[in-house]
């Protein structure tokens, strides 16, 4: 992958990365800063990427690490403070926003990547650097907890 291919690919996935950062951080300006830092770090290291077919998950991992670093810097306490007011249209329903905000961090990460950033289960597992089975288990647990929280009966 040369510099032009890198730039074109970044443009194709920029909005997806931005939405992911916004869902993690909940602040538009911080999400933009994180995205910029992610692209900068990816640009510095993309020639070292051994398997270019995993570029999307590799850069998503960089983005997630940057989000975690930003969270540490901000030291947010309230789970609702982590969630944005206008991240994506699907996420605007207040009960859903609150329910996702109450999930444990590991489950919340899977939900954000799978359902609000549009990653496949395999890409989610790669981005979080966890086994596919673990990602599937976390997804099932998160959905079960969300059903309970939102008052829906679990379908067996």
Image (cartoon, grey):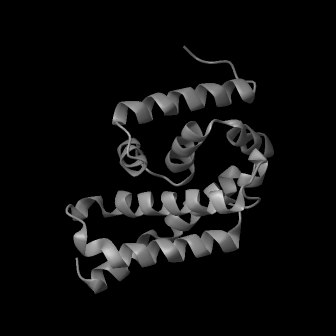
Q: Locate residue 4: give its quadrant.
A: bottom left
- Residue 24, percent from left and from top: 62, 55
The residue located at (57%, 56%) in the rendering is 68
The residue located at (73%, 45%) in the rendering is 97
Instruction: Describe residue 55's horizontal placement relative to residue 70 as left or right.
Output: left
Q: Residue furthest bottom?
A: 4
Q: Vertically, is 99 above or below 38?
A: above
The quadrant in which the N terminus is found is bottom left
The residue located at (44%, 75%) in the rendering is 39
Q: Locate residue 67: give its quadrant.
A: bottom right
Instruction: Describe residue 82's horizontal placement relative to residue 19 as left or right.
Output: right
Q: Vertically, is 42 above or below 69?
A: below
The residue located at (31%, 64%) in the rendering is 55
Give the camera-side residue of 87 and 79: 79
Give the camera-side residue of 131 and 6: 131
Q: Vertically, is 101 above or below 7?
A: above
The tally of labels here is: 0
Q: Locate residue 99: give its quadrant.
A: top right
Q: Residue furthest top?
A: 156
The quadrant in which the C terminus is found is top right
- Residue 11, percent from left and from top: 43, 77
Q: Residue furthest left?
A: 50
- Residue 147, percent from left and from top: 67, 27
């Amino acid at each position: 992958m040369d510099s032009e291919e890198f730039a074109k690919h970044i443009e194709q996935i920029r909005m997806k990365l931005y939405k992911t950062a916004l869902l993690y951080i909940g602040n538009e300006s911080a999400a933009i800063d994180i995205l910029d830092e992610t692209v900068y770090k990816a640009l510095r290291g993309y020639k070292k990427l051994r398997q270019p077919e995993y570029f999307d998950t590799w850069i998503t991992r960089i983005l997630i690490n940057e989000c975690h670093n930003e969270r540490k810097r901000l030291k947010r306490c309230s789970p609702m403070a982590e969630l944005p007011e206008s991240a994506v249209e699907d996420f605007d329903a207040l009960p859903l926003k609150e329910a996702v905000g109450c999930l444990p961090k590991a489950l919340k990460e899977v939900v954000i990547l799978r359902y609000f950033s549009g990653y496949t289960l395999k890409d989610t597992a790669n981005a979080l650097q966890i086994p596919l089975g673990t990602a599937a288990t976390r997804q099932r647990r998160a959905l079960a907890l969300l059903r309970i929280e939102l008052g829906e009966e679990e379908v067996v």
